[in-house]
Image (tube, rainbow, N blue to C red):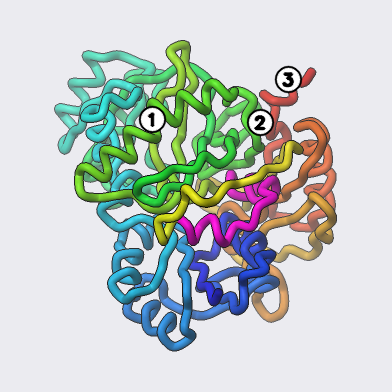
Amino acid sequence: MRVLLIGSGGREHALAWKLAQSPLMTEFYAAPGNPGIADHATLVALDVDNHDAVVAFCKEKAIDFVVVGPEAPLVAGIADRLRAAGIAVFGPSAAAAQLEGSKGFTKDICARYNIPTGAYQRFNNAPKAKAYVRAQGAPIVVKADGLAAGKGVTVAMTVDEALAAIDDCFEGAFGEAGAEVVIEAFLDGEEASFFCLCDGKHALALATAQDHKRVGDGDTGPNTGGMGAYSPAPVMTPDMVERTMKEIIEPTMRGMAESGHPFSGVFFAGLMITAKGPELIEYNVRFGDPECQVLMMRLKSDLLPLLFACANGTLDQVGAEWSDDPALTVVMASKGYPGSYAKNTPITALPADSDGAKVFHAGTALKDGTLVATGGRVLNVTATGKTVSEAQKRAYALAGEVEWENGFYRNDIGWRAVEREA
């Protein structure tokens, strides 16, 4: 197969690394890619927002299959454009991608199909939103409705904090994403990330992970796009996985099909495991970042036929095999993230890959032959082990070998699972 991967982050590097191992792969391109992805695929300087240019490239290179990594092109309808041109694609239509593109859309689906989630209200103006918050009290959760790169969510522990978050949204802190606000009940429990492939009719449960959203040790500081993750998540017992499939994934799949937007791609369900069981916090319509990195380290099966089965409706004919060994990834970020940070700072040394240990590139570029950090989250230092503790020890030993003066990372990724093991 001749394959094009769209995206340039850590998630896409993990997908590229895994896809490149497929014996079915004959030609592999990535647009725009990054220096890490360049080890596995030919980088193409395509503007992925220009869907006509993407289609033209696919025709020129006789691409059989396009894998879309990030959410923004999916919400913008790139999968629809490719399908209309007769090109197989992994990723949902723009209508189905609303599950991530609009928090309110997802909440309405949950309400309609009785999917367990926190109680909520939608608002398009600040005074009504604030009146609701004052009536409900805190803790309470304020979310920008649209795509805000993982930053439009405030878990407010006080009413004042919630009111400030409402102002942020309506005053343009998240651009158009904040034109509408979803306010929902605070769910108490342990978070987990659950992944499941879908072809519109069939679903295949993948693995579980746990992400660490806050920037500082001990889960302190502001929310980020994710500072590290590990897989599997011990809180996701076989019973909890079965309940998630039955109570959340299957009704969503049915609801999307009934509403005329069958979902094809990957469901990434952000869950809160409460006293009642699994409850949906939100859906993403692409692999998590940094969860994808630990999933790919544990996946023993060939990824390419799994993703292709989503595109051609044959997911019931394939299965996924996983290593029992946990994997853990530590995100190295630019100092200042998630606020402002210096760009193009040099990374002078990276550890070599070894069995069960790899550094994925998330926000890097080559400038005059030097590897530099261009993003907030820059590297994903990833390792496996017989236990989470062992994977954690290996990942942090690797992180210590990275020579990058402007980098920082959390020192406690995986702490919940390590505590459980102890």
On the image, numbered disc 3 is attached to which residue?
419
Give the mark nearer the N terminus: 2 vs 3: 2
Residue 282 in the figure: left or right of residue 416: left
- Which quadrant of the view contains residue 392? top right
- Magenta span: chief secondary structure: helix
In the displayed image of the protein, which residue is found farthest to the front?
Answer: 317
In depth, the one of 7 and 348 nearer the eye is 7
Task: Say if mark 3 contacts mark 1, CB within 8 Å.
Answer: no
Q: Give the magenta range.
A: 290-309
On the image, numbered disc 2 is attached to which residue?
217
- Which quadrant of the view contains residue 58? bottom left
Q: Position of residue 145 (x, y in %)?
A: 28, 41
Disc 2 or disc 3, which is closer to the eye? 3
209 within the magenta span: no
**Which three-letter amino acid code belongs to the residue tagged 3?**
Glu
Tell me, yes or no, if residue 35 can be seen here.
no
305 within the magenta span: yes
On the image, numbered disc 1 is attached to which residue?
248
Q: Secondary structure at mark 2?
A: loop
Q: Residues within 10 Å of mark 1 (few under 14, many from 20)?
A: many
Tell me, yes or no, if residue 167 can be seen here.
yes
Disc 3 or disc 1, which is closer to the eye? 1
In depth, the one of 403 and 94 nearer the eye is 94
Task: Say if mark 1 contacts mark 2, CB within 8 Å.
Answer: no
Q: Secondary structure at mark 1?
A: helix
Q: Position of residue 42 (x, y in %)?
A: 61, 79
Q: CA distance from mark 2 to mark 3?
A: 15 Å
Q: Position of residue 177 (x, y in %)?
A: 29, 48
Q: Residues within 10 Å of mark 3 (few under 14, many from 20)?
A: few
Give the mark nearer the N terminus: 1 vs 2: 2
Q: Secondary structure at mark 3?
A: helix
Q: CA distance from mark 3 to mark 1?
A: 29 Å
